[in-house]
């Protein structure tokens, strides 16, 4: 399997965490995967959980996978598989590359849910599945 990472939030181009990876990206393609997307009000960035909506973002390939993924694991507070202290879990999902219509396997960071009902209640559900669009509307409305 090629090593791809699907990003849907602050790691996308032009967002605040892209600076950590911008010189390491070999390929960037618009893509989508299945899940449910939320804006975390208290944190200012998104999180995805399992679901059947489409979540839109970017599929990235890096020039130094091992070092990049170690850095991103730290950024995303991922300490290892099934670690209860993880803020996000890094899992493999099917991702559709929009321009090509093909599906590839990719890693993605999904929020580590402690209490799904509480998570859903305190965060904003993004029905469109597009955090970039959500943030642009938020800025325009001075929310």
Image: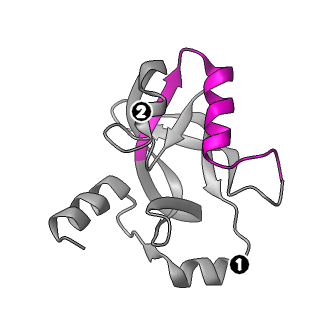
Q: Nearer the viewer, residue 73 or 101?
A: 73
Q: Quadrant of residue 86?
A: bottom right
Left or right relative to 13: residue 62: right
Query: Which disc number belongs to residue 101?
Result: none
For the point 57% across and 65% down, which residue is it? 51
For the point 41% across and 26% down, which residue is it? 22
Check residue 78 for magenta coloring: yes
Left or right relative to 40: residue 138: left
> Which residue matches tag 1?
115
Asked which secondary structure carries label 1, the reply is loop
Asked which secondary structure carries label 2, the reply is helix
Left or right relative to 125: residue 51: right
For the point 45% across and 72% down, which residue is it? 41
- Colour pattern: one colour
Check residue 9 for magenta coloring: no
Q: Is residue 68 above or below residue 141?
A: above
> Which residue matches tag 2?
19
Q: Residue 17: x percent and y percent?
A: 44, 41
Q: Residue 39: x percent and y percent?
A: 44, 67
Q: Residue 139: x percent and y percent?
A: 21, 63
Q: Is residue 43 above or below residue 13?
A: below
From which residue to which does the magenta span run?
A: 57-82
Res. 130 in view:
yes
Q: Quadrant of residue 27?
A: top left
Res. 25 in view:
no
Q: Residue 13: x percent and y percent?
A: 35, 37
Q: Quadrant of residue 130?
A: bottom left
Q: Nearer the viewer, residue 26 or 52?
A: 26
Q: How many marks?
A: 2
CA gap between label 2 and label 1 equals 32 Å
Q: Tag 1: Cα neighbours inside 10 Å, few (<14), some, or many (≥20)?
A: few
């Amino acid at each position: 399997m090629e090593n791809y990472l699907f990003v849907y939030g602050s790691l996308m181009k032009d967002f605040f965490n892209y600076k950590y990876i911008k010189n390491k990206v070999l390929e960037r393609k618009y893509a989508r995967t299945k899940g449910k997307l939320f804006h975390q009000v208290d944190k200012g960035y998104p999180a995805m959980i399992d679901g059947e909506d489409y979540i839109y973002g970017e599929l990235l390939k890096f020039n130094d996978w091992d070092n990049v993924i170690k850095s991103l694991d730290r950024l995303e507070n991922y300490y290892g598989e099934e670690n209860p202290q993880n803020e996000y879990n890094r899992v493999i999902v099917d991702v559709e590359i929009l321009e090509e219509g093909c599906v590839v396997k990719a890693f993605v960071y999904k929020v580590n849910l402690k209490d799904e009902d509480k998570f859903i209640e305190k965060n904003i559900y993004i029905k469109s599945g597009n955090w970039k669009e959500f943030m642009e509307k938020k800025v325009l409305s001075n929310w």
